[in-house]
Amino acid sequence: MASANVIHVTDANFDQEVMQSSKPVLVDFWAPWCAPCRAIAPVIDELADQYAGRLKVVKVNVDDNPQAPTRFGVRGIPTLLIVRDGQVKEQIVGAVPKRHIEQALEQVLA
């Protein structure tokens, strides 16, 4: 089940929700047809709940919103970005284990 802590973002509100966020943001670039994206979706939801209050978690459907992934050079999905203070601090490509994402988040949140 999808987490209430995950925000779906569009090209129109990407800057406001991600680049201007006062909290660090985990951005999940995904598409409904992408099997690896669906595979890590429950992990993204778990992380959104686990880091609630410390981290904002957003999902960007690359089919409906092509500008944001193009801007960040996203060539494959899923691609996760960790953005802090308007800058990309980490980029993770592919369906990786939850622990891998947690380690990247802990470094940025430290």
Image (spheres, grey):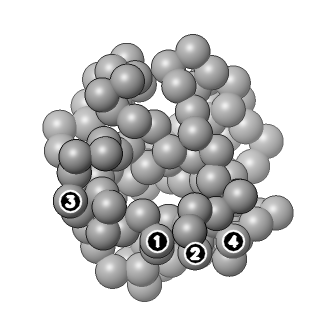
Residue with the mark numbered 3: 35
- The amino acid beneath tag 1 is Pro
- From this view, report whether residue 39 is shown above or below residue 72: below
Q: Nearer the viewer, residue 16 or 41?
A: 41
Which of the two discs, 1 and 4, sits closer to the camera? 1
C-alpha span from label 4 to label 3: 23 Å
Quadrant hosting residue 90: bottom left
In the rendered view of the protein, which quadrant contains the C terminus?
Answer: bottom right
Horizontally, residue 79 falls left or right of residue 98, namely left
Count neighbours of disc 1 (C-alpha within 10 A) and say few if under 14, some if 14 to 19, many if 20 or more: some
Which of the two discs, 4 and 3, sits closer to the camera? 3
**Dot 1 or dot 3, earlier in sequence:** 3
Q: Quick one: SS at disc 1?
A: helix
**Dot 3 or dot 2, earlier in sequence:** 3
Give the residue drawn at x 63%, y 53%. 6
Q: Are marks 2 and 4 in contact (CB under 8 Å)?
A: yes
Q: Can you tell which mark lies on residue 34?
A: none
Numbered circles on residues, count: 4
Q: Can you tell which mark lies on residue 49?
A: 4
Q: Are marks 2 and 1 in contact (CB under 8 Å)?
A: yes
Q: Nearer the viewer, residue 52 or 81?
A: 52
Q: Nearer the viewer, residue 87 or 53?
A: 53
**Dot 4 or dot 3, earlier in sequence:** 3
In x, y percent, where is residue 105?
Answer: 55, 68
